Amino acid sequence: MHRFAALSVAVPVVLALGACSGESDGAADAPAEQAAAGPLDIKHFMSALSVADIEAETTFFTDVLNFEVVKDVPLGEEMHFRWLRNGTQGIELVQMAGSQPGPKREAPPAHLLVRGPGQLMMEVADLEATKAALAEKGVKPDVDITDVAPLGIKVMFVMDPEGNPIELVEVKQAESAPAEGEEG
């Protein structure tokens, strides 16, 4: 089967998978005029990664980052979809026959010199505790904990088996400031 022929099979399957997710965006329920007049109600569904080795990627995300496989749909030898979840974070791994690696990316933050998706960003409550838990699993950060004060976050990067950067983010608690009009 030609790889584009696999797409003609895959696109309806992807749409069907989304329809079977049990989540509704509400757009089908809203009249067209309401949808056009108001703001879009958009929620993150999942991030997709095209991968060479779906099994190695699955092992990394399940064993290291505690994701679970929630859907697994192989479409013969040409294409394989696997959905992973950890809380509200979803990742779709897609292995397609004949896929090619993207441009080589440098270590973070220089990886952002290549346009397009930069990294998967996942929020954690405690970055130090996350670092310790990953160390117990033999994973060392590729970029250690870094305070990004202007953004109000601390970050740490790890790489998956294919070199995709994963940024673990701790949102720092804002210091309480006096409310507008109050004296501090």
Image (cartoon, rainbow, N blue to C red):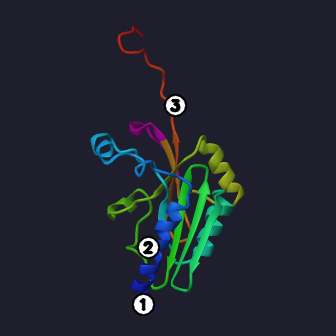
- Give how far apart the Cα atoms at labels 1 and 3 are: 52 Å
> In the image, is residue 56 above or below residue 88?
below
Q: Residues within 10 Å of mark 1 (few under 14, many from 20)?
A: few
Q: Residue at x 31, y 40 (%)?
A: 38
> In the image, is residue 164 above or below residue 120?
below
**11 or 81: nearer the viewer:** 11
Residue behind mark 1: 2
**36 or 76: nearer the viewer:** 36
In this rendering, position of residue 59 left or right of residue 91: right
Q: Does the stretch in magenta take in 89?
A: no
Q: Residue at x 41, y 15 (%)?
A: 179
Which of label 1 and label 3 is nearer to you?
1
**77 or 61: nearer the viewer:** 77
Q: Please, what is the dominant secondary structure of the magenta stretch?
A: strand
In this rendering, position of residue 163 left or right of residue 103: right
Which badge, 2 or 1, is on the more N-terminal residue?
Answer: 1
Which badge, 1 or 3, is on the more N-terminal residue?
Answer: 1
Q: Residue at x 62, y 74 (%)?
A: 55
Q: Quadrant of residue 73?
A: bottom right
| View extreme (top): residue | 183
Q: Residue at x 48, y 21 (%)?
A: 176
Which of label 2 and label 3 is nearer to you?
2
Range drawn in magenta = 144-153
Element marked by disc 2: helix
**43 or 61: nearer the viewer:** 43
Where, quadrant-wise, is the C terminus in this rendering? Answer: top left
Residue behind mark 3: 173
Residue 109 at x, y percent in the picture: 41, 56
